[in-house]
Amino acid sequence: MAIQDHAQIGIIGGSGLYEMEGFDEVRELSPDTPFGKPSDSLMLGRLEGKPVAFLSRHARGHRILPGELNARANVFAMKQLGVEWLISVSAVGSLKEEYAPRHMVIPDQFVDRTTGRPSSFFGRGLVGHVAFAHPTSTPLRGILEAACQEAGATVHVGGTLVCIEGPLFSTLAESRLYRSWGMDLVGMTALPEARLAREAEISYATLAMVTDYDCWHPEHDSVTADQIIAVLGENAVTAKAVLRAAVRRIPAPGDPLRSRCESFQALKTALVTPAHLVPEQVKAELGPLIGRYLR
C-alpha cells in the first residue's frame, strides 16, 4: 500500500450494510496480508472530514458465509492502514423482549459458540496471551451511544452477545438455552473479530442491529431470511446515520480519551516468547502488530 493509504477509523459493515455513502476522495484498495485477502476491497476516503476505511464483511452482494470469513485478513488489513478505532456493524437476533427489531444494542460482552474459526494472529513460534475480560472499548461504546442518540435510534447499552457458528439459525432448544444463560443477543460474526482487534491493539466495539426475536418468542417462532432482509434495509439507514455521528466524535491522536482504552497497550505484557526465539519470518509478517515490542 502507498504511504498516503492511511485511515484512523475503520468500519466493518455487516448484513445489509455493504456500502457507505457520503465518502469524499474515495478510492478502493485490495491489500495483501500474511493471512490472505480481506473479504472485499476496502473503500478508503474521507467521511465527515476524517480518513475512514470501510469493508463489507460478507463482500458486496453478500457472498461469504459467517464461517468462511477471513477475519484475520480483515482486521490485519485495517491495522496495515493505521486504523486505531474500529466499529463493527452486525445484524443480530434478540433474546429479550425489550430488544425489539430495529433497535440498536451496544454489547459489552461476548460468548463464543463458534467452531474452528482462526481467532489469533499468534502461533508459528510466537506465543501471546492477551487480556480479554472486557472485549470491547469503553470509550468507543460511549461514542456509539451518543451517536445513536443523535441519530434518533432506540439504543440499549451493554449486554452479552452469544456468537454461534451458523449459517443455520438456532434450534428452539438452543435459543431457550441461551436465554437461560442470561444472553441478550445472538449473532454469527462478532467473534473472532473482537479477539483479533484486541491482539492488533485496535479499539473495537460492535453496533448490533436487531432484526428478529430468534425463535424463542411465541409470536415470532420461525426466523426466515426474507423477514430479516426486510428489516435489514431499515436498520441500515439508521446505522449509516449512527456511523456518521460516531465518526465525528472519534478523538484525534493525542486526545486524553485514548488513555481510557486498554486496547492500545494490549500487547505490552502479553508476548511470552523471547524476541531472539521468534522466527524472522513471523517477526516480519506481524511487524504492524509486534514491531514496537520485538526489536
Image (cartoon, grey):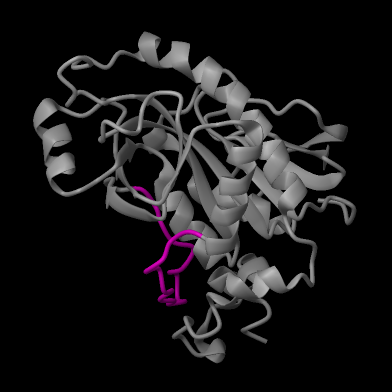
Front-lying residue, 163 or 27: 163
> Residue 93: x, y in percent?
33, 30
Can residue 33 be seen by looking at this rendering? no
* Magenta-drawn stretch, dominant element (helix, strand or loop): loop
- Residue that appears at 45% across and 70% down: 124
- Residue 162 visible? The answer is yes
Q: Quadrant of residue 263?
A: bottom right
The reply, left or right, for residue 21 in relation to residue 220 is right
On the rendered image, what quadrant is the C terminus found in? Answer: bottom right
Q: Is residue 4 left or right of residue 244?
A: right
In the image, is 182 to the left or to the right of 274?
left
Q: How many marks?
A: 0
Residue drawn 64% across the image and 33% down it: 151
Q: Is residue 65 above or below residue 143?
A: above
32 relative to 232 in the view: left or right: right
Report if residue 120 lies within the magenta region.
yes
Magenta-highlighted residues: 117-136
Does residue 56 sit above or below 285 in this rendering? above
